[in-house]
Image (spheres, helix red, strand yellow):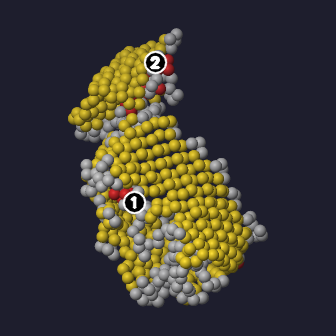
Amino acid sequence: MRKIYYAIIFGLISHTAGAISVNMDEPTVIKADKIEYDLKTETIKTTGKTEISNKSGQKMTLVDSYITKNGTDLSAGDIQIWLGPHVYLESDSITKSDDLTVAKHATFTACKDCDSFGEAWEISARRIKHNLADHMLYFYSMLFYVYDVPVMWLPYFDMPDPSVKHKTGFLTPSLESTNKMGTQINIPFYLYISDTHDVTATFSYLTAENPLFQLEHRLNGDHSQFRTRGSFTHNREGKNRWHVFNDDIVELGENARATMFLNRTSDKTYLQKYGFYDGQPYLDSGAKLELFGQSGYMIADAHIFQELRSQSNHIPVPAGNILPNIRGTYQTSPLFASTYATFMGDVLGISGDDFASQRLIGEARITSPWTIWGGNRITASVATRYDIYNFHNTEMIDGEEYSGLKNRFLPNGYLEWGLPLFRPSDTWTQVIEPRARLTVMQHIKDSQYAASSDSAGALLSDATLFSSNRFAGLDLWENGTFADYGLRWSAFNQDGEIVEAFLGQTYDFIKRDDTDPNSGFHDGQSDYVGRVGYNNMEWLNFYTRFRLSQEKLSLRHIETNAVVGNSRNFVNVGHIWSKQFDDLLTPTESIHEVMGGIGFAITERWSVRWNAIYNVTNTHWQQHSGALYYEHPCYYLSFGYRRDGTIKEDYEGTTTFQFRFGISVDGEHY
């Protein structure tokens, strides 16, 4: 149990009394006023001041020592031991016999000479025993000092030594306070079952709410891993509230893997109120089976969703559960030159309240990439796809319910051209690449059948250009013939600096079906999309992607992220703005959020960090948090807060204060 720092002390004593002795695996040097070696008993006796050191830099000084072969027995007085630059132990005397080591009037610190004010912390004990047989440390009359001021005394304390990785017992409690549930004291208990199997149970006492019980279970097999976290409370309103998060992975040989996951909660606001919320819009439970091959891949999965968001016309929510989804791909070796074939199959079932649908898709594609004279890159591809749907009481796009079969035949192909042009130099190497693609598809009446589907809609961006299907999912079919074109410029130098810019557009040759007016697609020319980025690999990383109106070049959408500084002194800024329309002519409230963070070092050891998300549209802080940190070579502490500004159903944002303190030994936190 590494969180308890006392374990360091007599791991060193035993190590010194045994491993640091003459028979260490690494070279060891003994210096003394007088050294006597008994060939018959193979023992060493030193007189006067003695120094024992090894190659690792560990050093022990003592007076009048007696050491047997392999360090099984040792006795000495005035012991001083250096395990590292600042890890120090001294004792009036140490005796070791077989598995038992006893140190009398011992003092230990991991902060020797770290501070001009004195030792940041140290421990003294009248007597300390280490039993190698049961790997236990026993402290008698232990006193803990901070800068030479005694702060805690215990008459007796025992704990496992550093060689023990797991030990059943209580862990260090933690403390936090919120404005809704008062002070929360967490008392964790660790249960060791085996080296690969353990449980942590936590009892949380809250001053303004009923107790909270938490459980975390971990199990590792030779080819499997099982993780479960959960909590439960019966609150003062008489309601049972809970959550369970489970993730299991089983490796089924080199080419298969099974995954099971369960994520459920009692209601929409429980995770936020009790601090288990990570911003997830919904919870997903189900299972997945993956099969891998040298040229193919298949996955079968099922999902059952639990919605956590408040319903909104601007938020796509999971419509029904996926039971199941089976899809696979296979790519052949080159048929000739670099030409290859790809086969794809997909089976999807969606079920909800009194409705269901099943989908079967099969696609075959041949792709032929070529590099010809002048560095021109040409790629030609043709494909055919066939869809079969079976609907039961399913709401269709026109709002009517339908039961029965539907099918569609979807041939398509594309021809793509690109020409990367390089201009190397001693300073910057520049690359400019024009690129264009013509995609030809059959224009059909039903680009999408059902309102409930795997397609979340259309949103034009630089990432969706040069794709056969620019929509999310497969149910919504990209209808008709269109062309994508754009220009990318980039430059890089030997110092690792990279700068990039891209601007592109798509053009529809056939009148589009009704599309979300905020998507960026129009009849004919779409909006312009692009990105700009710069990274000097040291103190600046900037990236932004945007969309401009194709008529007036006015800004319609922009996402920006920038990080300036290093790990201790930095500023990061994120920003998203998107103009929203109810229809092509009627604007509504825009999406506008700003995210930011700052960190700066006040001194070498004191630092501050703060971050926030602000909804500009609603003039509302979604969340913000900050903390003051102190990092000492021998200990650390922090005091911070977290404010959640969410208002949802019966939940109104909370403010939580947290205080942390711990001991550091050679950079390790305990």
Residue nearest the observer in this picture, 578 or 226 = 226
> Mark 1 near mark 2, Cβ–Cβ under 8 Å?
no
Callout 2: few (<14), some (14-19), or many (20+) C-alpha neighbours within 10 Å?
few
Percent of width and height locating residue 511: 57, 89
Percent of width and height locating residue 37: 47, 14
Tell me the SS state at disc 1: loop
Left/right of residue 412 with respect to residue 273 in the rendered view:
right
Percent of width and height locating residue 155: 27, 26
Residue visible at 32% across and 23% down in the picture: 127
Callout 1: few (<14), some (14-19), or many (20+) C-alpha neighbours within 10 Å?
few
Q: Which of the 4 image quarters holds residue 119?
A: top left
Residue nearest the observer in this picture, 518 or 386 = 386
Residue 431 drawn above or below residue 35: below
Percent of width and height locating residue 347: 64, 66
Give the residue type that dot 2 points to: Asp
Residue visible at 49% across and 17% down in the picture: 69
- Furthest-left residue in view? 149
Give the residue type that dot 1 points to: Asp
Q: Which residue is mark 2?
A: 98
In the rendering, which numbered label is found on residue 352? none
Residue visible at 27% across and 56% down in the picture: 180
**Tag nearer the camera, 1 or 2:** 1
**If the image is split into quadrants, where does the C terminus sit?**
top left
What is the distance, in whole Å, between disc 1 and disc 2 at their CAs? 60 Å
Residue 411 drawn above or below residue 601: below
- Furthest-right residue in view? 336
Left/right of residue 57 with respect to residue 462 in the rendered view:
left
Residue nearest the observer in this picture, 248 or 269 = 269
Q: Which residue is mark 1?
A: 267
Residue 447 drawn above or below residue 533: below
Residue visible at 41% across and 71% down in the picture: 311
Residue nearest the observer in this picture, 401 or 492 = 401
